Image (tube, helix red, strand yellow):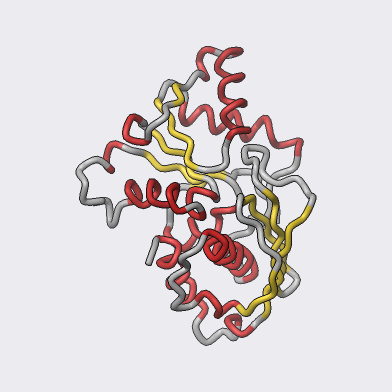
């Protein structure tokens, strides 16, 4: 089991008896642009007239019941992508969150400004498909010294770990997220208290809602 499976269990308990678990979800890749920070494939998920999207390195094209993921070990990256896609769209449908899709181009600068304000002057590890964000952070730091961050190659060297969708989907990246995710503030390795995890982008919206975790996607659209 993983923290993704834990989020699924929380959702299962929250929608128990609502009938949502019997509904069909349509998941499909699209050519539409997703979160500008991520460089994965955008996947669109539809349920009950609501639409959500995420970026992933493990796209899929499938129709499934919501209940497919209940009690599933979610062992593969594709299964975890599907589970997070369903978490997103059901969280949107049930109004646990109003965010389902990435922000529009008009909000990109404001979003980046708010993110850099949180992490400026810190050592940052990128855990996900975030090569686009890496370039943005380097450019912002070169233009505005007060926005400069130090990107590090190992999570143990970081003050802040930024986690995108692939930080939950990819096996090795998920292991990094879980190492510092903690359990009631105690991850058991004596190191998690010194790391700040910030989950970013629409891919992790439902996951963060279920776990009550810090999520940076201030301009995400319905």
In which quarter of the view is residue 82 placed?
bottom right
User: In the drawing, does residue 170 fall left or right of residue 123?
Assistant: right
Res. 22 image quadrant: bottom right
In this rendering, the answer to whether 144 lies above or below 173 is: above
User: Which residue is rendered at x = 61% and y = 26% of the image?
Assistant: 136
Name the foreground residue: 43 vs 79: 79
Query: Which percent across, then down, holds residue 110?
Result: 65, 32
In the image, residue 192 above or below residue 49: above
Residue visible at 50% across and 63% down in the picture: 76
Nearest the eye: 197 or 171: 171
Q: Is residue 141 above or below residue 169?
A: above
Q: The C terminus appears in which quarter of the rendering?
A: bottom right
Please, is residue 86 above or below residue 38 in the view? below
Q: Work out whether residue 175 can be spotted.
A: yes
Front residue of this view, candidates 10 and 6: 6
* Image quarter in which the N terminus is found: bottom left
Q: Position of residue 31 (x, y in %)?
A: 79, 50
Residue at position x 26%, y 51% in the image: 187
Query: In terms of depth relative to the viewer, which is nearer, 55 or 207?
Result: 55
Q: Is residue 13 visible?
A: no
Q: Please state the horizontal and vertical placement of residue 180, each as a whole percent of the image.
A: 33, 46
């Amino acid at each position: 089991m993983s923290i993704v499976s834990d989020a699924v269990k929380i959702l299962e308990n929250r929608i128990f008896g609502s009938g949502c678990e019997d509904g069909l979800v349509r998941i499909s890749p699209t050519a539409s642009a997703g979160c500008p920070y991520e460089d994965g494939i955008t996947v669109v998920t539809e349920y009950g007239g609501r639409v959500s999207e995420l970026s992933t390195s493990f796209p899929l094209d499938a129709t499934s019941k919501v209940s497919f993921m209940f009690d599933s070990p979610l062992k593969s990256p594709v299964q975890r992508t599907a589970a997070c896609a369903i978490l997103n769209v059901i969280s949107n449908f049930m109004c646990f969150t109003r965010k389902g899709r990435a922000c529009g181009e008009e909000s990109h600068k404001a979003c980046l400004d708010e993110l850099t304000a949180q992490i400026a002057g810190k050592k940052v590890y990128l855990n996900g498909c975030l090569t686009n964000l890496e370039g943005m952070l380097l450019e912002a730091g070169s233009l505005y010294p007060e926005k400069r961050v130090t990107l590090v190659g190992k999570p143990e060297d970081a003050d802040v770990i930024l986690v995108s969708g692939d930080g939950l989907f990819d096996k090795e990246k998920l292991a990094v997220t879980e190492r510092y995710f903690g359990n009631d503030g105690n991850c058991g390795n004596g190191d998690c208290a010194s790391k700040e995890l910030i989950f970013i982008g629409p891919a992790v919206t439902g996951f963060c809602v279920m776990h009550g975790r810090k999520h940076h996607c201030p301009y995400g659209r319905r």
